[in-house]
Image: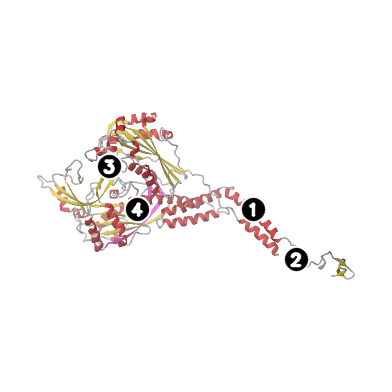
Amino acid sequence: MRLSLVLPVALIVLLSVVQFPTVHSQSPQLIPQQGFGLNRSASLTVKIVFLGITPDELNSTYLKRNVTVPPLKYQTILAGPLNTGVIFSFNYQLVFADNSTVSSFARYLSSIQREENTFSGPLTPSGLVNPYFTNSSTLSMAQNYFYDADKVESWLGSNMTLFGGNPVSGYTLFVADLHSYKIPSFNYTEYQNYVTPCRPCTPQAVQAHYYNRTVTDPDLGLVMYRHFMTGWGGSSRFYYMDLSAGPSYWTNELPVQVASQLRGISTSNYYGKLWMSKFVGSYVYGAVNNLFAPDQLYPVNYSQNYNLQLFVLDNRTAAEMSQGPQLTATINETMIQQNLASLVPFAGVTVHIKFANVTDYPGLAAIMANATTSLRDLISGRPIVDGDLVYNWFTTSGLGHITNFINVTRTTSTIDVPAFLFAFKGNYTFGVPVKEDIGSPNIYGTFGGEALGDMVLIGLSQQADFTIGNNSTYGQGGKGAGFTHDAIHELGHMMGLNHPFIYDLTEDFTNTVMGYYAYSLNFSQFDRDSILRGVNDELLSFALQALSTTQNTLFNAGDISMANQNIAKAENLYNTMDYAGAVQYSLAAAEDASAAQQLANSAISPALVFSLIGVAIGTAIGILLGYLLFRRSRPAGVQYNRCPTCQQPLRWDPAQMRWYCDRCQKPV
């Protein structure tokens, strides 16, 4: 084939196959409430570092078997009979710190040690009491030794290299037994003296060590002391538990040196090693399920924007409003926004707070009057506002009056989270008085706040919250607790977070607002991992499901290829725990997979239309360029049908069989 024909054809073909970029639909997609629930696996390494526990005291093989620690976990969604489809698999590594390292740690604890003695009752109305040791007939004094929990966590974080560092994809669990390292600890003899019935008794002293912290309410300044913890963590990807600490009234667990003697255990024999392994394993079980691979309360969903709409409604008496505090002083919008934004750094988070009186809404005022009962909770003694009646008035599953406040949207573009925060008169609290609570009081019969899936309800009161510092138990006149802590906590539930103590109470000693005991004001690293991991799981599960049911065609092959490439990039970051960095690729994979699915299911689509336009334009441009580049040109140089001298037309002379120039009168 001649070159003049080959090149135009090649240009036409080249330009005709050049298509416009694939068009992805950016319209918001409704989020199914149950999430995607597709199977995918996530591997985590759990590195257990023993401080003061030697290999001779354990059966390491038995500890790592399925009977003591979980090898797998199917992540569930607790608010409903659902699971996320994520299967966690755990690889356990055991590290035993050498004696010099443990001694160094114990010396550090001694350097920050603070002693405070307590008795069976407070010496002053606001004096410290150890709630575990209150039996005046057997206790003369409790010598409590406290270590600042945040400082201990900081020391461990700064010395992680001593223990080999944190796993690339996983968490570290420090398990300590320090009773042999000159750390004052509760012992079996003290336990016997304290619990053994006697008459008459000779009261005895006890000693125990704990980890403590102090927190100040960000709204109304109440100082809260959290003294009796046996573990701590949450600022980084490790958790510390001291099995020799306590006993703490919050968990009611005996220290290992007491529990082992109570059961007649010696770790020098075979059974003793198995018992110790099971004892440690029960703590590992709690940390893994509560912190490292927690369940979700509600499905974790991706959105470009999270819009938190808070309605703070004053239901106090006129005298209480006059007494103060002003409603605007009971909540910190900036702190709420910053904390929620830390969970979803890929998205926009806005907080809007509207203040009003309940009487501004006559219908709400009427239902509040009906819900404000004369019933009193049998445990706290506080009067109850029936939370069910209030919720039924708001929810679209009931009377639906929430639409008077907000039209809730739940799409991949925007998720609205409404919250109604009530300032009650007196010491009222929300409660749900059901028949089971009448004869058998339940500690969960009342609640300060609740995340209900479609909204948040919070109820704080003038006496029991806003001005509780005036109570002699606190002795902090003019101080109180506002809405901020509870709002962050309940909004965290709405994002999908659970409490850190579902499987074991020890993990309530975690630096997270989702716990109860510590009264932290921030989310933990475990919380942030849980949300970001959940977002990636949702998007990647969607992408994988879409691709598994999508036929590969000429028109969607590019989208399928891009989806697989983005899945690989997301998984690579996911597996190194860069969950925040993985979100952009997980999202791109979901969008590519969705586009491929749409192309496979539709004969005519935007991408197909643009592809055909690309072919047409490419063909036209190819033909035009071929004509311009390869059309026949006028020959250059001597032209044999004209005279080379005068350039006049030549005449053919048949007699001479030559061209002849009539002007020059000579043959050429």
Choose top left, top right, bottom left or bottom right for residue 19: bottom right
The residue that label 4 is drawn on is 292
The furthest residue to the left: 200
Query: Which residue type carries mark 2?
Result: Ala
Which numbered disc flags the more N-terminal residue, 2 or 4? 4
Which numbered disc flags the more N-terminal residue, 3 or 2? 3
Which percent across, then down, holds residue 493? 37, 44
Which percent across, then down, holds residue 467? 27, 37
Is 481 drawn above or below residue 630 in the view shown?
Answer: above
Q: Is residue 137 left or right of residue 166?
A: left
* 4 and 3 marks in contact (CB < 8 Å): no
State the residue in front, 151 or 242.
Answer: 151
Query: Which residue type carries mark 4?
Result: Phe
The residue depicted at 41 percent of the width and 57 percent of the height is 575
- Using the numbered discs, state the Cα–Cα distance from disc 1 to disc 4 in whole angstroms: 56 Å
Q: Which mark is residue 617?
A: 1
Is 633 drawn above or below residue 239 in the view shown?
Answer: below
Which numbered disc flags the more N-terminal residue, 1 or 4? 4
Q: Is residue 214 visible?
A: yes
Does dot 2 land on a helix, a strand or a loop?
loop
The residue that label 3 is drawn on is 222
- Using the numbered discs, state the Cα–Cα distance from disc 2 to disc 4 in whole angstroms: 83 Å
Determine if the magenta segment contains residue 89. Answer: yes
Q: Which mark is residue 636?
A: 2
